[in-house]
Image (cartoon, helix red, strand yellow):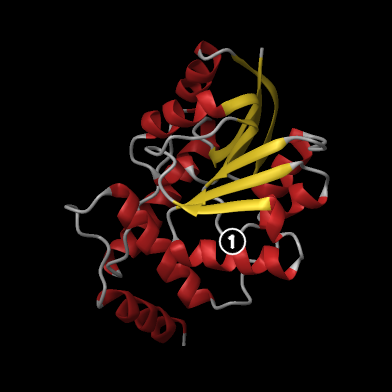
Amino acid sequence: MNDRRHKIDCDRDADQCACDPGRSVGSRIGDHFDSKVERAGPGAGSSLHKTSVALLGLMGDPTERTILELGCGRGGLLLELLRSGAAGVRGLDLSSASVDQARHRFATAGLADRVTLEVGDGAKMPLEPSDWVVLDRVICCYPDADGLVANSVPAARRLFAFSVPNSRGWRGLAARVGRQLDNGWNGLCRRSCKTFVHDLDRLDRTLTASGFSLRGHETRGLWYVAVYERA
């Protein structure tokens, strides 16, 4: 049964293969997550990922803060921040299907007037400054994390928060093996969007050089979650 389900999923992606290396990274990521949203259906994504829960705890009270999330997906994290008192939230995502579902989620919650959602690439678009900038399981989608981080860090007035696969110790080894297996399966299914394990020490150096210091971090399975505060 599982083999048959996987074959169906692969076949559904094969007609609109997003893995063409000639296409931009952003377009491949967007098409990949459009396909995931379609396969999951409208009722999926209602519960928060463990990294999102960890970020909520580490970031603290969002009251009267403005928040920008790059790679906001279906809006679950932003919705919780808005319910917790955020002054306003903005979300940017490469997947138009994800943004459509996020808009529906906020409209259903009666909060559509307090959120701005856009389809776009956070590594390239000009970003309006916000108190907090959040990238939850987003940096790992980019083969070159430097461009995304360089474009997004200046937009953070107070906090820069992110979650990525852990690159350190045995967790780093396990994360790399897991990514290789996932990328291999996605390649067989002709799905785009490889994922990557980026060097945490390099991220730390970049943020420190940009005037941030580590305020808190957690390990959740093979994921590393961190919040940096502008000095």
Q: Nearer the viewer, residue 194 or 209?
A: 209
Above or below — where is 78 with respect to 4? above
**58 left or right of 184?**
right
- Residue under numbered circle 1: 74
Query: Element at badge 1?
Result: loop
Horizontal and vertical percent position of residue 139: 47, 40
* Residue visible at 74% across and 59% down in the picture: 111
**67 left or right of 179?**
right
Q: Nearer the viewer, residue 188 or 164?
A: 164
Above or below — where is 182 with respect to 9? above
How crowded pointer 1 is (Cα within 10 Å; few <14, some 14-19, many 20+) is rated as many
Q: Nearer the viewer, residue 16 or 178?
A: 16
Residue 159 falls in image quadrant:
top right
Q: Nearer the viewer, residue 168 or 115?
A: 115
Amino acid type for the residue under numbered disc 1: Arg
* Residue visible at 49% across and 16% down in the picture: 205
The answer to whether residue 178 is visible is yes
Above or below — where is 74 with respect to 120? below
The answer to whether residue 46 is visible is no
Residue 11 falls in image quadrant:
bottom left
* Residue visible at 53% across and 19% down in the picture: 207
Q: Quadrant of the C terminus?
A: top right
Horizontal and vertical percent position of residue 9: 39, 78
Horizontal and vertical percent position of residue 143: 33, 40
Residue extending furthest toward the left? 22
Above or below — where is 4 with respect to 157? below
